[in-house]
Amino acid sequence: MTLILAESSIEKVPKQLAKHPSVIAHARRRRRDPSSLILDRTYHHSAMKTLEGQASTPDMSKRGRPDIAFHVLLQALGSPLNHEGLLRVYIHTVDDKVIDVDPNLRLPRNYDRFIGILEQLYETGSVPPGETPLLRIRKCTLSTLVKESGTSMTVAFSTTGKPVTMKDACSWLAETPAPVVLIGGFPRSHFQQSTTELADRVFSIDRESLEAWIVTGRVIYEYECSIGLPERRLPV
């Protein structure tokens, strides 16, 4: 299964915010250049407020939340499905970049260290630099990434989709060779229309909006159950 965290709230601090006092103060504490920081609403909320409502600015409610990707990666990379080599994870960002994640990546449990890795990734293009990086970032649209996966079926999870249980959704996924799953990497709002148009099916698994890492954990576990992975991994 290929899991894509789509439209993820990861980007560098925009140029128009680099001189805002909250960004400068945060950069000083980090001993970094303001323009090299990853946009994070926890530290840059007052700066981001200055852009909200501007017609030329993308939806600010979907920006500045790299912690979502952090929690999703912890769920995905630590799963039995990944340990068995049956999962590929990609992060598609709100500004149309794609982060290729090596299944063998051992993600730091500390969020600040994760942000440091992201900043290095944006500076060097890969972490660690070299021929076999564990993380690589490249300019790529979501539609191109889905095509690269070679899948015959793409499923998106959204509150706007058809109501089904996760068990039923994953039973259907298990019948599809190499399915692609799209989960929103933003705190609220909905997928862009261009994203939902990539999906063959759009499912809603709850009457309320669930955090991305909750959806991730559930889809991975139910998919594991649908393919009989828990039984295969238990000792005889």
Image (tube, rainbow, N blue to C red):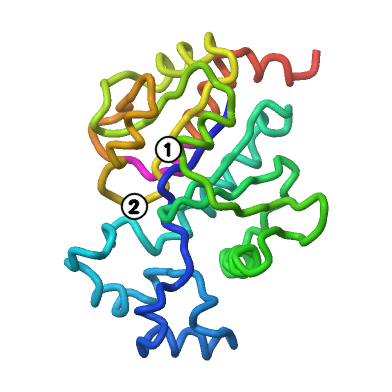
Mark 1 surroundings within 10 Å by alpha-carbon count, few (fewer than 14), some (14 through 19), many (20 or more)? many
Looking at numbered disc 2 in the image, what kind of residue is underneath it?
Pro
x 58%, y 23%: residue: 150
Residue 136 image label: none
Residue bearing the label numbered 2: 187
Which residue lies most toward the top here?
A: 175
Q: Main secondary structure of the magenta part?
A: helix
Residue shown at 63% from the left, 13% from the top: 228
Q: In the rendered view, tell whether residue 137 sits above or below residue 47.
A: above
Q: Is residue 214 magenta?
A: yes
Q: Is residue 25 magenta?
A: no
Q: Is residue 70 left or right of residue 43?
A: right
Residue drawn at 47 percent across, 18 percent down: 153
Tell me if 153 is positioned left or right of 82 in this view. Answer: left
In the rendered image, the quadrant that contains the N terminus is top right
From the viewer's perspective, tell me whether residue 132 is left or right of residue 147.
right
How would you rate the neighbour count of disc 2 (Cα within 10 Å): few for under 14, some for 14-19, many for 20 or more?
some
Q: Circle 2 — which element?
A: loop
Percent coordinates x, y for residue 126 in the rendering: 70, 58
User: For this rendering, which residue is in front, 73 or 33?
Assistant: 33
Residue 172, position as x, y percentages in the image: 45, 12
Mark 1 secondary-structure assignment: strand
Q: Amino acid at mark 1?
A: Ile
Part of the protein shown in magenta: 210-216
How far across and how far down the image is residue 212, in percent? 42, 43
| Residue drawn at 33 percent across, 32 percent down | 196
Residue 225 screen position, x and y as percent: 57, 17
Looking at the picture, does residue 4 appear above or below residue 197? below
- Residue topped by disc 1: 183
